[in-house]
Image: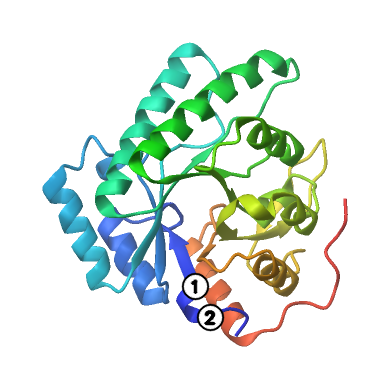
Amino acid sequence: MLIDANQIGMHTDDLPLPPREAFAMAARLGAQHLQVGVAQGELQPDQLGPSGRRHLQRFAAGLGLRLAALQASLGPQLLLTDRAVDEHLARTRRALEMAAELEVGVVSITLPHLRSNQETDRTVLKHLLHELGQKADQTNRLVGLETGGGSITELQSLLDELRCPNLKICYDPGLRLMAGEDPLHAIETLSSHIILSHLRDGFHGDQRHWGREANLGSGQLNVGAYLQMLQEAGYHGPQILRRSDSGQPTADLQAGLEYLQHHQPPSRDIISI
């Protein structure tokens, strides 16, 4: 097997089921860890009170699941306007408070793509991250910045400028491929910041066209090399298996698990961009 079975996790947003059914399905498929979407629906922090949170924690434990992270953002569509930033801050602060209550160490957010006239956006984004870093410190949690289609270089620059130990990276190699980058090279850049790994495969895109997602082992990610590089970089946490762009995500996640259990990684090298 390519990784220890105890490292395998899933994301509730990839299972098209009500939350508790998604928990149960993840456990049946063999997941040990779970990343839980709390940006909308019945698991939003302002919808789930103290008793509901205790029940959710017991329910997950009863299924043998460890809550690896909460995801507090809806995606990269966030506009960097004052109103949108205030709403995002409030939502993520509530998620950090809920994570502390549930004893979940990480809250992940997806950063918006910076526009071409990005200096103003960058200033607003730095303010947003500074505020979230302070709240993470107060709650003794970590904020995991998800690496979507934005620039890895820009993200590294922001982290270096902010120097906040509570701001980390939730790394997704499949999204880097689809953005037209070499996902293994980015690990070298971000290794000291990675707090959570999404295990996703895909086909590379370019500056004009976004690539496409693929079942684990059927795309252009050298899975074995990726896992080895993460381990060498000091990452030994969960691998959250992702399949979000699929008409049959449950079956595709099952296929990904079978790949990890029974196959060796492809011998081809990862495409360098």
Which residue lies at the image location 76% right of the left edge and 38% below the top edge? 153
x%, y% of residue 129?
53, 29
In the image shown, does 84 or 155 lie closer to the viewer?
A: 155
Mark 2 crowd level (few <14, some 14–19, many ≥20, 10 Å Cα): few
* Amino acid type assigned to the residue bearing label 1 in the image: Gln
Please rate how many residues cluster around mark 1, counting C-alpha atoms within 10 Å: few if below 14, some from 14 to 19, many from 20: some
Q: Residue furthest left?
A: 51
- Relative to 109, 24 lies left or right: left
Q: Position of residue 262 (x, y in %)?
A: 61, 87
Q: Secondary structure at mark 2?
A: loop
Which residue is pictured at 60% across the width and 35% down the height? 163
- Above or below, 240 against 113 in this view is below
Q: Position of residue 62 (x, y in %)?
A: 22, 72
Q: Amino acid at mark 2?
A: Asp
Q: Which residue is mark 2?
A: 4
1 and 2 marks in contact (CB < 8 Å)? yes
Vertical arrangement, residue 25 with respect to residue 113, above or below: below
- Mark 1–mark 2 Cα distance, whole angstroms, equals 6 Å
Q: Residue at x 56, y 46 (%)?
A: 168
- For residue 7, which numbered disc appears in the image? 1
Say if 21 sits above or below 116 in the image: below
Relative horizontal placement of residue 52, taking residue 220 as reference (left or right): left
Q: Position of residue 68 (x, y in %)?
A: 41, 59
